[in-house]
Image (cartoon, helix red, strand yellow):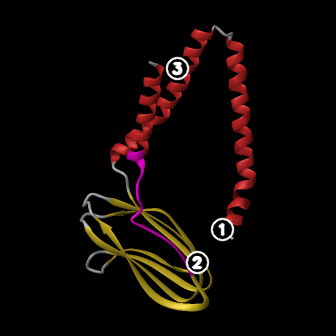
Amino acid sequence: MNNIKAWAGLAALLTCEVALAQQAFLNLDERVGPEPQSTTRQFPIAVREATTAMFLDAKVSLSKGLLSLRLLDQAGKAIRDYGTGREFTVQGSVVPTREQGTFQLEVVTDGAVGSYKVQLTPLPPASVFRLNLVTGPAMILVALASVLYWRIHSKAIWRWFWVGAAAWVVGVGLKVAWAFLLNKPILHAVER
């Protein structure tokens, strides 16, 4: 009976993971240079559902020149102009796509040397957001139920559960402290 519960829990977890997984429409990680370049490139974005909106995240880091980003509709008209600059970041820009078709991301470089990253992902449907609101409290309920189940079957005194909870709090606190101190240096080293 316990194996059936374990397999059912695993199946539910995998179902949630598949439902939440979103494949990117576009994922660019481009280097420009080492000589200054002036180009206009267009990257196609195929939108198959008319109700889909998109999230755009971008990071531009140039040592020379300028770069501009624009999102174009099927007719070539600019939907969004993300500006021109040597260094800029766009985070979570929501782009509504009222119709399906092929959009274009236009990247224009002017004497540019450096790098840029752009990611366009579909905005998940509202049902996924509602599922995210349920999963956190459900995880807490599972933890509480397992503690109660173990307490009833083991007849252990509550003090040991509190010792375990305190050890967990200390461990999470240390994890947060280490992440706060080391995440930036590690990410900079990985990018280099």
| Point 42% across, 62% down: residue | 24
Q: Is 180 placed above or below 43 here?
A: above
Residue 45 part of the magenta segment: no
Viewer-proximal residue among 102 and 180: 102
Residue 1 horizontal side relative to residue 88, left or right: left
Q: Position of residue 76 (x, y in %)?
A: 30, 81
Using the numbered discs, state the Cα–Cα distance from disc 3 to disc 1 in whole angstroms.
43 Å
| Point 43% across, 24% down: residue | 4
Q: Which residue is mark 3?
A: 145
Q: Which residue is mark 1?
A: 191
- On residue 179, the disc is none
Give the amino acid at mark 3.
Ala
Using the numbered discs, state the Cα–Cα distance from disc 3 to disc 2 in whole angstroms.
50 Å
Q: Position of residue 35 (x, y in %)?
A: 61, 92
Mark 3 or mark 1, earlier in chain: 3
Q: Is 55 placed above or below 61 here?
A: above
Q: Is 66 placed above or below 146 here?
A: below
Q: Which residues are magenta?
A: 18-31
Dividing the picture into quadrants, the one containing residue 11 is top left
Residue 100 horizontal side relative to residue 169, left or right: left
Q: Which residue is mark 2?
A: 115
Give the amino acid at mark 1.
Glu
Q: Secondary structure at mark 2?
A: strand
